[in-house]
């Protein structure tokens, strides 16, 4: 048993996980981590510029190892963000990955961004209103319970 070289035993497992970890890394990448990577690498993502139509094809040409589903989810997160929609609402021109201006932003796309923002703001306002109403109802119930307890205590003393 002592004749085995134990210094060689740990080496193959250490080499295998490093290779295995580096191979599935693009596949195991989350949409949010991919988006952070895209924001550091491409000015159009970093500056929230309106992306040109077909930006997914440009991304795949530059980064062929990307998982399409993860990429599309990351693009959805980016283009659905409040900051991107606010820029799209007023934008005139779309941009490529490197930030160079390209095609024009249509009125339809600007109107869509405006509509999505309005729906979001309305939904948030409705949520806050419901939250305030629930808090007010809770407070009213607490005050009512306190008054009932005071009355009960008052009549309990007289008896």
Image: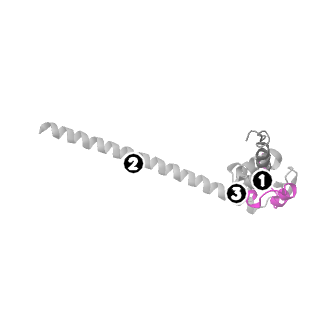
N-terminal-most mark, 1 or 2: 1
- Residue 76 at x, y = what percent? 71, 57
Name the disc covering residue 113, or none. 3
Q: Is 121 placed left or right of 87 in the picture? A: left
Check if residue 50 falls in the magenta segment. Answer: yes
Q: Which residue is mark 2?
A: 137
- Residue 66 at x, y = what percent? 80, 56
Name the disc covering residue 67, or none. none
Mark 1 to mark 3: distance in Å? 31 Å
- The N terminus: image quadrant: top right
Mark 1 to mark 2: distance in Å? 50 Å
Element marked by disc 3: helix
N-terminal-most mark, 3 or 2: 3
The front one of 63 and 15 is: 15
Structural crowding at the residue carrying mark 3, measured as other residues with C-alpha within 10 Å and reported as few (<14), some (14–19) or many (≥20): many
Farthest-out residue, left: 159
Inspect this view and state whether residue 23 appears.
yes
Asked if the residue at tag 3 contacts the one at tag 1, i.e. Cβ–Cβ closer than 8 Å, the answer is no
């Amino acid at each position: 048993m002592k004749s085995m070289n134990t210094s060689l035993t740990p080496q193959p497992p250490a080499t295998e996980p490093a290779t295995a970890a580096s191979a599935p890394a693009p596949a195991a990448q989350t949409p949010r981590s991919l988006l952070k990577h895209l924001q550091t690498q491409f000015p159009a993502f970093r500056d929230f510029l309106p992306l040109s139509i077909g930006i997914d094809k440009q991304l795949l040409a530059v980064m062929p190892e990307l998982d399409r589903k993860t990429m599309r989810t990351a693009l959805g997160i980016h283009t659905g963000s409040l900051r991107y929609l606010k820029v799209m609402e007023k934008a005139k021109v779309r941009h490529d990955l490197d930030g160079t201006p390209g095609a024009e932003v249509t009125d339809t796309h600007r109107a869509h961004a405006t509509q999505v923002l309005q729906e979001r703001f309305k939904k948030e306002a409705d949520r806050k209103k419901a939250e305030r109403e629930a808090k007010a109802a809770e407070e009213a119930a607490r005050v009512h319970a306190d008054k009932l307890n005071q009355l009960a205590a008052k009549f309990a003393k007289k008896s």
